[in-house]
Amino acid sequence: MLQGTGSDVGKSVLTAGLCRAFANRGLKVLPFKAQNMSNNAAVADDGGEIGRAQHLQALAARARPSVHMNPVLLKPESDTGAQIIVQGKPWGRAEANTYQKRKAELLGHVMESFDMLKAQADLVLVEGAGSPAEVNLRATDIANMGFALPAGVPVVLVGDINRGGVIAAITGTHQLLPAEERALIRGVIINQFRGDLRLFEGGIKVIEETTGWPSFGVVPFLRAVKDLPAEDAVVLEKYARKPEGTLRVAVPLLPRIANFDDLDPLRAEKGVEVVIVPPGQALPRDAHLIVIPGSKATIADLRFLKDEGWHHDIHAHVRAGGHVLGLCGGYQMLGRHVADPLGVEGSRADEDGLGLLEVSTFLQADKAVQTVRATALGTEVEGYEIHTGITKGEAMPFTMAGERVLGNRSKNGRVMGTYIHGLFAKGAFRQAFLRHIGRDGSDADFDDRVDGALNTLAAALEKHLDLDALYAASR
C-alpha cells in the first residue's frame, strides 16, 4: 500500500506506474483504493462509477476496470456534503460530520471488495488517501491505516521533495503514528526529485536513522506525468500557458467541476491553449472556444456562473461568432432551464439556463452510468455517460447513439452540448471538431499517448526504485 505524507504527493501516479512496471514483469496486478474523494469519475466494465485514477491504474495494469477497485467514492456536492458511491452505485448523501460517523458501516464493503481482488491477483497495489498522520480523523479512518491494519497490508510511505520539507514530513509522520502502525511501514519513496541526487544522500540517511525505514529509491521529476489524467481538480489552476497557441479554449472553473480530464486531449494538441479561468476573472475575449465543463451540482454551479458574470461573457462570445461546447452538466446549463423537483442535488430548485439551446433538463433520481458509442460530425465517438436528468427540446441533434439523442446543437452549429465524456480521446472526432470550428488538429488517439506515458513512467520506476525489494516487502 502506498500512503503519503499528504495529499498530491504522487500516490496515484506512482501506483499507476508500478501497476504497469509489475505487469510488464508478467504479474497479474490489480489496483485498489478503499475510499476516494473526486468528481472525476469513470465507468467500470462491470457497471457503476469508480474514481478516474483507479480506472487509469487498471489500464496501466492491463486489467478490466472494476467497481471493486474503488469501493467507496465520495463526490462532493458542496463545501461540506457529498454523494456516497459504494461499489459503483449511489448509497446516499452525507455532510462531512455525519459521514465520519457512518464510515464504520462502509468498512465491510471495503474489505469485501479487497478480498475479491486479492483472490484474483498476484499483486494488489493499494493507494492511500491523504495522510495516515491525520490523527484527528484516525478513529473513523478506512482509507489509510484504518484499512491497512485490519487487512494486514504492508505500507510504503511516499514523500514529495518538490513540495519542500520532505524530511520533516516523513519523520513527523513517524512521530505521530502509534507503534503498531509504524511497524506496517516497510520503507519510503521520495518523489519528484530535481538536481544532483548526491546532495540528498544526507537527507536519506537522516530519514533512515530517525525512523528506521529504509529507502526504496528516489524518483526524479518526470515530464511524462503531464500526459496522464489528473485526479485532483486543483491541478487545473496550474495549467501552463502555450505562447505558440493558435486556438484559445476558455474554461470557467466551476466549484463542483467534474470529469475535467475531458479537456486533456485538447490541451495536448499542438497549437491549442486551454485557459482555466478562476473566479473573479472574466472569460477572455480572444477565446475561440468556450467549454462549459461537467458539474456535480448543475444548478448550484449555474447560479455561480451567473454570479460571476460569466453568462454575459458567454453570450457576448456567441454574438461575436465564437463557439461554445457544454459537457454533461455544462450541456444542461446551455438550455432554457434546469429543474430539480425531487431535490436530487440536495434541494428542490428550478433555474433558468443560458438559453443558447432549445432544450430543458429535468433531474431525476435514476443515474445513467454506462459506456457509449455514438456518432457526431460524421465520425464515431466512444466515451461514457455519468449523469442524472433527461434533456429534451427542439434543438438539432449533435451526438447520437442509435436513436438516442445524447447531445444537441444550435441551428448555426456554433453552440453544442453533449452528455458524452471522453469524446475528444478519439483522434478522428477531435480532428473533425477542430475543423468544425475552423482549426486543424491531429488524428492521433489520446489513449495511445497515455499508454506511452505509462510505459515511460514504468521504465523510470524500474531504473530508480528497487522493485525487487518492493515486491518482496509485499509478501
Image (tube, rainbow, N blue to C red):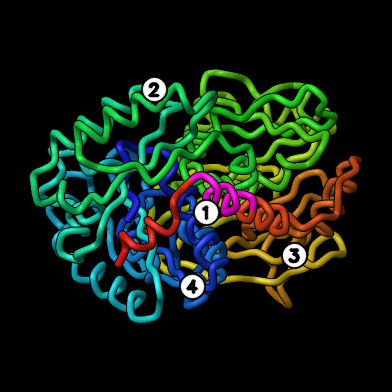
Which quadrant is home to the N terminus? bottom left
Q: Nearer the viewer, residue 347 or 423?
A: 423
The label nearer to you, 2 versus 3, is 2
Check disc 3 and report the residue beneath it: 381
Q: Residue at x 28, y 76 (%)?
A: 115
Q: Please state the horizontal and vertical placement of residue 452, each as a whole percent of the image.
A: 69, 54
Rounded to the nearest angstrom, the CA distance separating label 3 from label 1 is 28 Å
Q: Measure the alpha-carbon separation of dots 2 and 3.
A: 43 Å
Identify which amino acid the numbered label 2 is placed on.
Gly
Q: Secondary structure at mark 1?
A: helix
Residue under label 1, please give it.
Answer: 17
First in residue order: circle 2 vs circle 3: 2
Which percent across, then down, holds residue 294? 56, 48
Q: Which residue is mark 2?
A: 164
In primary-sequence order, the first of circles 1 and 2 is 1
Q: Is residue 387 visible?
A: no
Disc 1 to disc 2, C-alpha distance: 23 Å
Residue at 48%, 56% in the rendered image: 18
Which class describes the residues within 10 Å of circle 4: few (<14), some (14-19), or many (20+)?
some
Mark 3 residue crowding within 10 angstroms, few (<14) / some (14–19) / many (20+): many
Nearest to viewer (mark 1 / mark 4):
4
> Which element is circle 2 on?
loop
Q: Is the stretch drawn in magenta largely helix, strand or loop?
A: helix
* Residue at 64%, 71% in the rendered image: 372
